[in-house]
Image: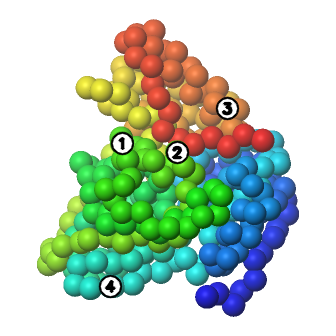
C-alpha cells in the first residue's frame, strides 16, 4: 500500500505529456498512488474521464479539457519475477524498463516492441503489434479496475483481442498490472538491438509524433497507400506527412491538434479517391 496521498492538480499542460507535443490544459488532473486512490477518484468523476499512460498514441484537443484526467503514480511502475517464466509488470511501467529487465534476465517475448515509447498498460489496451507479434501473445492475465471502480483479474482467454484493439479498450479498464509468460533466450540482447535498429531505420523519430496514425487495411499497408498518393512531405499548418514513413504525421513546426486533424482528413480523402479504401485511425483523440 502506498503512503503517498492522492494528488489533485489543476491546469496541467498536456502538450508536455504527449509524444506529439500537442494539447491544451487539463483543468483537473489526478495522480493516483494506490488502488484505493483510483476507486476514490472514479467515485467522484463517475465514468467520464480520460486515462493518461505514456501519451504516445494520442492527439489532444487544443482547447482546455473539462473532462478529468487520471494517471498512475510511480507505485505502478515495477517488475516482479513470480517464477521461472512468469513476470508481473505494473501498468505504468515503461516498455524500455521491461526490455532492459529482459536483457538482464535473458527473457525473450518483448523484443519486437523495442523502441516503442509506451507503457505496459497502453500496449495491452490497444493490443500493440510490431514486426509480426502482438503483445497479447505473451500475456497470461491482467489485474484491472473498470470505470465503475470494480476490480478483478481477467485471464487472457476472457479478453477479446483484435488488430490494434481489445475488449479492455472498449470497457475503458485501467490496467493495474499484468502477468506475462516469457522464454529464456541467451541471444536476447542482440535481438532487442536488431529490432531497435530496424525501427529507427524505418520510422521517423526526428520530430514529435504519435507513431502510426492509421491502421493497415486488409492486404495493404497504410504507408504504401499514402505514399502512392504522393503525400510524403505534404504539409498542413505545422503538421506534415513524414518523408521517412508515410503513416507518420509529425509535428514539424509547433503544430496544433487542428493541423493534424486537417491533415488526417486530407490523407483519408486522397486515399479513398485513389483506391476506394477508407483508412481507419489508430490514434486516440481527446476532445473537450
Q: Earlier in the sequence, mark 4 or mark 2?
A: 4
Q: Which residue is mark 2?
A: 170
Q: Picture coordinates of residue 69 (x, y %)? A: 72, 58
Quadrant housing residue 266: top right
Q: Residues within 10 Å of mark 4 (few under 14, many from 20)?
A: few
Q: Earlier in the sequence, mark 2 or mark 3?
A: 2
Q: How far apart are the alpha carbons under marks 1 and 2? A: 12 Å
Residue situated in front as seen by the camera: 243 or 4:
4
Q: Earlier in the sequence, mark 1 or mark 2?
A: 1
Q: Is residue 276 above or below residue 222?
A: above
Q: Secondary structure at mark 4?
A: loop
Q: How far apart are the alpha carbons under marks 4 and 2? A: 29 Å
Q: Which residue is mark 3?
A: 259
Q: Is residue 117 above or below residue 204?
A: below
Q: Is residue 178 visible?
A: yes
Q: Residues within 10 Å of mark 2 (few under 14, many from 20)?
A: few
Q: Residues within 10 Å of mark 3 (few under 14, many from 20)?
A: some
Direction bottom: furthest residue: 3
Residue situated in front as seen by the camera: 7 or 117:
7
Q: How far apart are the alpha carbons under marks 3 and 1? A: 30 Å
Horizontal side of residue 90 vs 107, given as left or right: right
Evaluate if marks 4 and 2 touch, with contact meaning CB atoms under 8 Å apart.
no
Q: Which residue is mark 1?
A: 162
Q: Which residue is mark 4?
A: 82
Tell me which residue sits at (36%, 47%) in the image: 161
Amino acid at each position: 500500500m502506498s503512503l503517498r496521498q492522492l494528488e489533485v492538480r489543476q491546469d496541467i499542460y498536456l502538450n508536455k505529456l504527449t509524444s506529439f507535443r500537442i494539447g491544451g490544459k487539463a483543468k483537473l488532473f489526478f495522480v493516483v498512488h494506490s488502488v484505493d486512490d483510483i476507486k476514490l477518484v472514479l467515485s467522484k468523476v463517475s465514468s467520464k474521464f480520460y486515462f493518461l499512460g505514456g501519451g504516445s498514441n494520442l492527439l489532444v484537443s487544443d482547447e482546455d479539457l473539462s473532462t478529468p484526467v487520471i494517471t498512475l503514480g510511480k507505485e505502478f511502475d515495477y517488475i516482479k519475477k513470480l517464477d521461472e517464466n512468469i513476470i508481473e509488470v505494473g501498468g505504468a511501467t515503461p516498455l524500455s524498463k521491461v526490455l532492459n529487465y529482459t536483457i538482464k534476465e535473458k527473457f525473450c517475448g518483448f523484443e519486437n516492441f523495442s523502441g516503442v515509447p509506451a507503457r505496459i498498460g497502453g500496449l495491452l489496451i490497444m493490443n500493440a503489434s510490431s514486426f509480426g507479434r502482438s503483445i497479447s501473445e505473451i500475456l497470461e492475465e491482467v489485474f484491472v479496475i473498470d470505470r465503475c471502480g470494480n476490480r478483478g483479474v481477467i485471464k487472457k482467454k476472457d479478453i477479446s483481442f483484435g488488430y490494434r484493439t481489445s475488449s479492455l479498450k472498449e470497457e475503458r479498464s485501467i490496467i493495474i498490472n499484468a502477468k506475462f509468460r516469457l522464454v529464456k533466450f541467451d541471444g536476447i540482447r542482440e535481438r532487442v538491438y536488431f529490432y531497435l535498429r530496424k525501427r529507427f531505420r524505418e520510422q521517423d523519430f526526428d520530430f514529435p509524433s504519435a507513431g502510426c496514425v492509421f491502421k493497415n487495411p486488409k492486404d495493404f499497408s497504410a504507408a504504401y497507400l499514402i505514399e502512392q498518393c504522393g503525400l510524403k512531405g505534404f504539409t498542413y499548418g505545422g503538421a506534415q506527412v513524414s518523408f521517412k514513413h508515410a503513416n507518420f504525421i509529425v509535428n514539424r513546426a509547433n503544430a496544433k491538434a487542428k493541423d493534424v486533424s486537417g491533415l488526417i482528413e486530407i490523407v483519408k480523402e486522397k486515399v479513398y479517391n485513389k483506391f476506394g479504401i477508407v483508412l481507419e485511425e489508430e490514434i486516440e483523440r481527446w476532445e473537450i
